[in-house]
Image: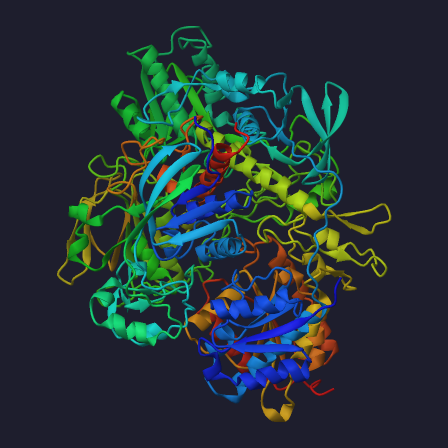
Amino acid sequence: MTDRKPGVYLCKGCGIAESVSMDAMEKVATTENRIPVCKTHDCLCADEGVAMIKADVAAGEVNQVIIGACSPRVMTDRFDFDGAVTIRANLREQVVWSQPAGEEDTQMLANDHIRMACAQSIKTKPPLPKIEGEFSETILVVGGGVAGMSAAREATRAGHDVILVERTDQLGGWARKWSERTPHRPPYRGPVENDVASLVSAVEGDGRIKVMTNTRVTKTAGMPGRFAVTFNQGGTEVTETIGAIVVATGWRPYDATKLGHLGYGASPDVVTNVEMEAMLANGGLKRKSDGKAARTVAFVQCAGSRDPNHLPYCSSVCCQVSIKQALQVAKADPDASCYIVYEELRTPGTAEEYYRQAQEAGVIFVKGKVKSVGADLTVTYDDDLLGNDIPLSGLDMVVLATGMVPNSTDTSAEAIEPEKSALQLKDDIDPEAAIAIAGYAGEAPAAPERPERPIPEGGPILNLQYRQGPHIPMLADGFADSHYICFPYETRRTGIYTCGPVRRPMDMAETAEDAAGAVLKAIQALKNASGGVSMHPRVGDLSFPKFGLDICTKCRRCTVECPFGAIDEDEKDYPILNPARCRRCGTCMGACPVRTISFDNYSPQIVADMLSSVEIPDEFSGKPRILVFACENDAYPAVDMAGINRHQISPYVRIIPVRCLGSVTLLWVSTALEKGYDGVMLMGCKSGDDYQCHFVKGSAIAKERMSKVGDTLKSLMLEAERVRLEEISIADSSRVPEVLNAFSDEIVKIGFNPFKGF
Amino acid sequence: MAGVTSQTILVVGGGIAGVTAALEAAETGYDVVLLEKEPTLGGRVSRFNRYFPKLCHPTCGLEINYQRIKKNPRLQVMTMAEVAGISGERGNYTVTVKTTPRYVNAKCTACGDCAKATDMEVANSFNYGLDKVKAAHLPHEHAYPMRYVVAPEAVASGEGEKIKAACKYGAVDLDEKEATFDLNVGAIIWATGWRPYDPQKLTSYAYDLSPDIVTNVEMERLAAHDGPTHGKIVRPSNGEPAKKVALIQCAGSRDLNHLPYCSRICCLGSLKHAAYVREQYADATVDIYYIDIRAHDKLEAFYNRLRRDPQVNFVKSKPAHIIVGEDGRPVLCGERTIDREIYKEPYDLVVLATGMEPSVVGGFAPTVGAVVDDYGFVLPEIGDGEGIFSAGVAGGPFDVSMSAQSATAAALKAIQAVRADGA
């Protein structure tokens, strides 16, 4: 690499020059740090300011542009220069907007920001991507139902070859057996024709789709761009190179034999909604028991769903399916009577019209919770209105609207290696965890005991050859891993995207759309892999962790803690990175006890240089120093927004943004205390149930690590209170000053760090 | 089809759906123009305090998305811009874009001197007019782009000149005019989202008669730390804590006289509002008046969390009307569906869970190459050969996750439409 040529550019605008001395900062850059180029400008982000920097870069005088101006969160594109690395010192939001003008402390803070930026530049290198090997643009789709077939077609329409793997001997999945489907287009009345056959023939006629029926994935190794996937088709094994994977393994009906209380098994005329589909498809509804026409039919909703003893979630589609089946019965026999017994009728969105149609058609909706179904087909429900049990009798048939169970595993295959699977499942979130509520001071009903969720039955879908186990991670409710609010396709296994009912209960129309979304992410993943750039959330990042194996002790912390399973172990137990799986959060770097993991532009050394560069006044100055590591996704913006609101923050605080709290190594904490900082705070996202960490587990891991820091402090004869982890959300712009100011006051009370000056 | 003459994808609407669609397409290697009619991106979700079911903050995901935008040279964002016309076909659309003056140009550094220069205040549209803001202002603390706006009222009066004089960077331009220009694009993603159904149309709910009757979107602002009350849930009439709160479901939705469809998010939204109130006040009670609680799929767990709270009551009933009591409190009148009891119950605060009305109702609707249903939803896909796709609530009443899902799908559809090698 060419020699580094740092240049410091200081902005006088936005009140900076009125608040602090530019000369003093310039002196820090040129005299203290011997930076050869240091220029100031009235408005650095204006065209002239940017042109000035550009000229220096173009002339080859500067290849590290150190900007002392606004926050790195703004003017990002203005201060982006070809051929140079940009480093930002946040003089505006975090100095002049949050400190009184003209004060000595404000100047000290500004000077320290310049010091930290200069120190950051010393070891920072422009990241070079890691690109090696051959890449494939082929997309593997696992599952040949509506989700999988839709995904395959979407992928070929976008120009990609597809291998579509189906476990059974034909395409179509459950939908193949259905006569009609629920409406999804205006006028949203139905039922409408089930067009799955045309989808099957479109897939079979698509020259870019290689359909493999009777096939299982037996092994998946590698990473996005070049997964090595082994298939077993009727006993013959083949291995193909695959760019990215869409998992569309769908669902299976909840096992009705567990619903004995609802009469399943007691009478052949108690059937599931899936069995009902087959009966309707055969035309004319006949009782299984005696072959007579079924003219009075009751549908029991939530048969298994929304029941803590069975499926805790709502299966979403059953209300609409029962309406469809009732309308089909009514259409075939105008004299038939259909009852739908429900607790909450759920026809969201435009499906409301469908519900209305059923009411118009004479389907009788009965609100109540069904307690039992007898062998004589008497449905007994708990009537909310009258407060007692009501029997519904004289029925010819009872249909149980059983719910959807996601095929997150292959239940027809053997479970394997339980202890490794356990590793990836035990940290799951509990969607029913209690909300912290003001009135709950102990007397409130606690969240139900979380059932022990053993390793799911069945074998893995992809059999990932990952250190962290063969399964695609799944959530507590058994559905495949998904960041289910803002970024629904993000999972903990880069390049592997789930769609359809394996991800969330959904109907056919939504499944087809979901398949398109998953395919888009798959295409992005294989493109990014071949370019050596990161996927979400650090999209485009070229840096990746490098491992200094010469001092690696093979402790395996990095391979265990990586939230994305990006690091495997070689045959000698050394870590090996799969760069295209890596999301660049740095959790491995924070985990490494010998600090031998680093990025080109982010490393234990670079941050240690930064924190060491801060001037620590002696104990007689009365000025403590507090070091804060702030998560750059949430806590750091919250600090910026405190500045935007002109909230004052303790001038004793020095803030270093970190990629994720998971990347914080204890080395930084101990170095800070050795250097004489009086307190250290980690500000990051909420962990635990309802975690908000963008890297899923980073903040939880940091919390775990910090829980052990007390002993280290004790051995140094330091108070445990000097180091703290604080959960800060991005909406905490008002709370951030309170938290920091309170910590600062507390540190003053504890007294100065006795190591100061040594 | 005449072939693809432009590979640029236009995304109309910069809420969560539009931002997601634009980023997903740009990050797959396509040029994207994103139009937003307001001064900042983020749309409805940026006005939400938190999301269900995790009770996390929308700004958290938006921050990630804005960082992605800042780093992506393929994505161009235009604010205060909307579509006035579309002609052409897949691969070659001419879109007429109309821009509204911001009176602040790209030289703005967000230093805030303009706001200091004026005392003039205007209604704060970010907070649905619940409070006021300076005539020159940053729309909110998390605004992207981080750039000030000057209100037209200030420009019409002499205040504009004072504001302009205060700017050191020549960023205030009072001569900006409404303008139109044409864009040539190959595909269009329609992501114009929704507006809250007008509560004034729900005449029996007396929205105009009491400040203590608010809508669900206003409730989000009352609970937000950067809202008009800095996050304290109080009675707007007198600033007292709102400790007895009624949440009325289906205020407009599932009603043939108003919105015939179910807006899907309101049940979960109200469960979230119950959590807001209960987090703030140990002694608060919340009554949720509902027809069906529609906590679909895994969101059922969120419903269960609230059901365990003994101070949150679920009342199956659609209130008939609201009157204002002698003490000024709104009083809910109606009949309970279950026991047929007539009630007349006063509350500190009543929240109407008004539904989502698609923005194309009463506005510009894409009619070339798209199908708009009777409700005003633009259907997400219309088969091969078309090049306009909807994302998010423009296509149906979706929650945030489904909006992001449909936006990601729309990005793929748009890419398929503009691929040079054709499909």
Q: Is residue A237 above or below residue B362?
A: above
Choose between A484 and B409: the one closer to the eye. Answer: B409
Q: Position of residue B282 (x, y in %)?
A: 38, 63
The part of the image, by quadrant, that contains residue B160 is bottom left
Residue at the spot 63% in from the left edge and 41% down from the top edge = A527
Residue at the spot 24% in from the left edge and 37% down from the top edge = B255
Q: Position of residue A747 (x, y in %)?
A: 58, 82
Residue at the spot 19% in from the left edge and 53% down from the top edge = B207
The part of the image, by quadrant, that contains residue A659 is bottom right
Choose between A167 and A750: the one closer to the eye. Answer: A167
Q: Position of residue A436 (x, y in %)?
A: 46, 59
Choose between B84 and A393: the one closer to the eye. Answer: B84
Q: Is residue A678 above or below residue B153?
A: below
Q: Position of residue B306 (x, y in %)?
A: 41, 50
Can residue A267 be seen by looking at this rendering?
A: no
Q: Residue furthest bottom?
A: A620
B276 left or right of A125 in image: left
Quadrant where the image shows the N terminus of chain B: top left
Q: Is residue B154 above or below residue A415?
A: below
In this rendering, the count of numbered labels is 0
Give the colouring mode of the picture: rainbow
Can residue A653 be seen by looking at this rendering?
A: yes
Choose between A171 and A528: the one closer to the eye. Answer: A528
The part of the image, by quadrant, that contains residue A291 is top left
Q: Residue furthest top?
A: A291
A323 left or right of A407 in image: left
A241 left or right of B106 in image: right
Residue at the spot 41% in from the left edge and 38% down from the top edge = B188
